[in-house]
Structures are given as structure tokens and as C-alpha cells.
Image (cartoon, helix red, strand yellow):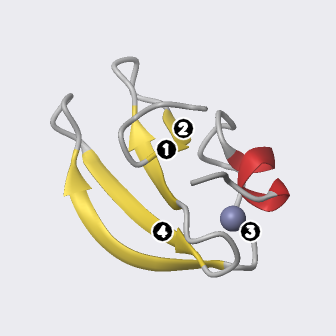
Amino acid sequence: MVPCDLCKSLLGRPGYVPPHPRLTRTGDAVARTGGQVFLYTCQRCRQVIALSPTADGADYWTGHDGSVS
Ligand SMILES: [Zn+2]
């Protein structure tokens, strides 16, 4: 699945960047670090994007598996 430009521009960005307009909140998960992960699904490309805490405590936009690609 190839992320659309809106998703690509969000991946790897810090958590203070707001979700783009086509993202819908679709669930929660627990990160490997034990923190809360917020899952969003893009209505344009169907990509699942996660707002995940990293080990240093900052939130980042990642793919649903924690990758940024
Ligand atoms: Zn997208």
C-alpha cells in the first residue's frame, strides 16, 4: 500500500503536527514502550497511520508497524 502525499508528508513528523484532513481516528494500541498509540486510517489511500510515543517520550507519526516509510 502506497501512502498518498498527505500521509507521506505526515510520516516521521513530530506529534504536535495535527492529523491531515482525510485521516479518521480508528482505534488505539499499546506501543512496545508501553505508551498509548492512536491509530488513524486515511480515507484517501487507506494507509493506517499511528501516532506513537518513542523511547524518549516524544510522539511521532509512523506507519502502523512503527516504521516511517
Ligand atoms: Zn493517505
Crowd around label 4: few <14 · some 14–19 · many ≥20 (10 Å):
many
Asked where in the image residue 60 lies, by quadrant, the reply is: top right
Q: Position of residue 16 (x, y in %)?
A: 66, 49
Is 63 left or right of 65, judged from the image as shown? right
Query: Which residue is disc 3 drawn over?
Result: 20
Q: How many other residues sit within 10 Å of disc 3, few (<14), some (14-19) or many (≥20)?
A: few
Q: Which marked residue is nearer to the observer: mark 2 or mark 1?
A: 1
* Vertical relation: 17 (above or below) 32: below
Between the C-alphas of marks 1 and 3, the distance is: 14 Å
Q: Name the residue under label 1.
A: 63
Real-space Cα separation, disc 4 to disc 2, in angstroms = 13 Å
Q: Earlier in the sequence, mark 3 or mark 2?
A: 3
**Which residue has dot 4 on it?**
40
Would residue 48 be visible to someone looking at this image?
Answer: yes
Residue that appears at 47% across and 50% down: 51
**Any mark on residue 60, and which?**
2
| In-front residue for pair 3/29 | 3
Q: Which of marks 1 and 4 is nearer the N terminus?
A: 4
